[in-house]
Each structure stands twice: as C-alpha cells, then as structure tokens.
Amino acid sequence: MLKIATRMLNRVKYVAPFVVFIGTIAYVNYPLPTSWIIVTSLAIVGMAMIRTDPKIDEVFPAIVETEPTAEDADQASLAEMQNLVACLPDPCFLLKPDGEILFQNGPARETLGEHGKGESIFSLLRAPEVRDTIGRTAETGVRSQVQYFERVPNDRLLEVHVAPLADHRNEGAGGAPPLIMILHDLTHRHRLDRMRTDFIANASHELRTPLASLIGFIDTLKGPARNDRDARKKFLGIMETQAARMSRLIDDLLSLSRIEMNVNIRPGDSVDLAGVVGHVLDALKPIAEERGVALHFEHGGDPALVLGYRDELVQVVQNLVENAIKYGQGGGRVEIGLRRVTSPTSPDKIRLDVRDFGPGIAPEHVPRLTERFYRVDAASSREKGGTGLGLAIVKHILNRHKGSLKIDSVPGRGSVFSVVLEAAEDNTG
C-alpha cells in the first residue's frame, strides 16, 4: 500500500501544477461555475492516479518511475560478471551450482573448444575430482582447488580453482550464488621440474663415475701398487683420462648454464660464418687425421655474415664437426657446406650443413638427440669422450641466435646436421 500511495503522490506531484494552470485560465477567461472547475480538476487528478493507458508515458514521461525487478537485477549482475570473466587471461567459466555453464571466456574457448550456455561442465571435464570440488564449493560456499591429469587429447596437468561469487548463500535471490571456475595449465611447469630433476640426477651420475674411478685408483696406488712402477704408470694414465672427462663435463655444464642465462639477449654483432668454419677445421684437423677422417669444406668464397657471438658460433660448429668425426669415422670423410638461401617472402638465410657417412641414426632416436645427456649408445659415447651435452648446447645457442637445427639421418648412409641462421647485412662496401 505504501508503494502504491507513493507512486500516486509522485504522479499527482507532476500533474497538479498543470491542473492548477488550466483551472486558472478557465476561471479568468470563461464564466464557468467554480464548482465545475473544481470537479473537472479533481477528475483529471484522479485519471492521472489510476490511469491505465500506457501512452500517457509519452506525454508525461516523468510521471512513471518503474522499479527494477529481481530478474532485472540478476541479469545486470550476470552481465557484469561476464564482462569481468572475459578480461581474465586464463580459461574461465561461470557455472550454476549444478555445473551448468553460464558463460566461458575466450581462453576457455581456445583451450577446450566452444561450449554453449546450458551445457554441463562435467561433460567437458570428465574427472571425478573436479565434480567433487564443484559440488563441495556449491554446498559450503568455500573456495577450493584440485589438480588432475588429462591424457586425452594430449597429456596435460591442470589445476582447477572454484569459488562462489558471493560470501554466503543468498536465499533471497534464488538460492546459492553462481560459481567461477579458473583453469591453470601446469603442464609446462611440470615438464620443467621433471627436466630439472632428471638433469641433476644425470649430471650427478656422470660426475660420480669418473670420481669413483679416481678414488679407487688413488687408494690402489697408496696401497698394493705403491711400489709397482708399471701399475702406477697404467693407473695414472687412466686417472688422467677420467679427470679430463670430468673437466669436459664441468665445462659443458658451465657453458650450458651461461647460455641459458643469456637466452633472451639477442646478439648484435656481425660474424663471418665462413671464417668460423675455417678456424674450427684448422683446430680439428689433427683429431680427424688421427681417426682417418678427411674434412672437405665447400662454399662460394664470399663472406657468410650472420648476427651472432663468435665464440658461441665456434662452439656450435666445433660440436657438430667433432661429432661427425667421432661417430661417422667409419665413412672416412666429413663434408661441410655453407651457402646462402634467398626467398622473396622472408629475409636471406645462411645454411651450414655437416654431413658424415657413418652408420647413421635410427629414426626413433633423432627427435631426442638434443636432450641433455641423451645418447644413442651411452658406452660408445663415453668411450669417445662425449658428455651427452654437445647437441643440447648447440640447440640452446641457436635458440638464442633465433636459428634452427635440422637433423636428417638414414641408417647405413650417414647423417646431415643443418644449421640455419638469419643473414646479416654486409656494410663493408
């Protein structure tokens, strides 16, 4: 009743001045009875109070003051929540307490596909732990989270956060409030943690083996072989080999760490890759001759300028050529080719190919060759002085130089390791 009376008074408030004005004009200009004017005025006021014709709003728009309904408020609130969720960078859903989807943002569409309003989140995330988490949050009104591993279509580790969009159950607005569900993809972080753990374990193992050898021979030389000149000479030679192996491993570990620290710093110097290859071949020529391998370098004779750090590019070429000498020595030769690759749609590239004619590599091993400590034949690699880090270092250096490494190998016919780097402008002319 109070609301009705208020609305009527609001109408009268706007109509009364109009009625008084009309009544005054009529009384002054026309000899009408006062009683008739009063009755007519009251009739107009009454019509304004109980009017049913909606067109009067067009004449007196301020007369009617509509009050928002609970449904209008809910729709406005939902629109605000959707605008907020749409701005979040992570996949996010607005849900009813029973799991029905109200809204999904752009990242959710990109990650999990398009899912319309009214679908159930449980048909999308088929994990009992997710269902339990949503149900628990809807029932208690307390935010919760859970991790689950998804194997289809790809292996992924997801962390699901669910929270109500109110501090308590609002029974007056139709029951429990909507829920917001945010997904964090932890797959990359999980893989990095696993790689870090494997790296520490492999590095410890690689260092422990030569160290155990050194300790054992030292104990032997201090004891039974103390006065045995021949044994001492033999053991000291083995100890020297093992110490050199540890030194190479430590150098590679430090080199890899240094490269990773500066991986986001793009080199800005122009380096002649042809000169780098010539320098490396001069340094490795004695090793190649000792193993009966001939080195052949083919290039046009012009400078092959790339943007890079000379020392790191020397390391790339040295690792690739040295591997070709060690593991492809059965073929008797290693060919190194350097050429410029032009394209009308992209900047010019410089391509370096290192080809050996050894036993080749089985296809299942090729994708993993740049992993740290991965070896096709661990025993043969250690025997030839390999640390298992050479190609990993090459990959990280090329990543820093915005270059690429491609490996082609056919068992029984040899392997080709190709490096592609962006060419630098020749400003010497």
Image: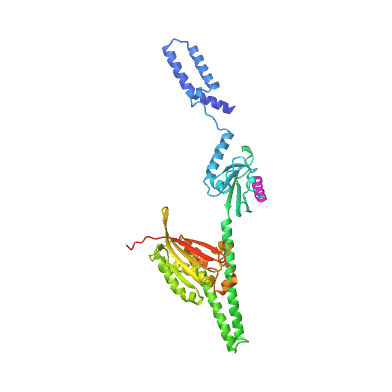
Magenta segment includes 130: yes
Query: How far across and how far down the image is residue 349, in percent?
Result: 43, 59
The structure residue drawn at horizontal position 61% and vertical position 84%, both measured from the top left corner, is: 220
The structure residue drawn at horizontal position 54% and vertical position 78%, both measured from the top left corner, is: 243
Query: How far across and how far down the image is residue 53, in percent?
Result: 53, 21
Magenta region, residue range: 128-140
Magenta segment includes 285: no
- Front position in the image: 360 or 185: 360
Query: How far across and how far down the image is residue 154, in percent?
Result: 60, 53
> What type of secondary structure mainly makes up the magenta span?
helix
Q: Is residue 115 above or below residue 208?
A: above
Query: How far across and how far down the image is residue 101, in percent?
Result: 61, 42
Q: Is residue 415 above or below residue 285?
A: above
- Front position in the image: 169 or 318: 318
Q: Is residue 106 above or below residue 385?
A: above
Asked if residue 217 shows in the view, the reply is yes
The structure residue drawn at horizontal position 57% and vertical position 80%, both measured from the top left corner, is: 238
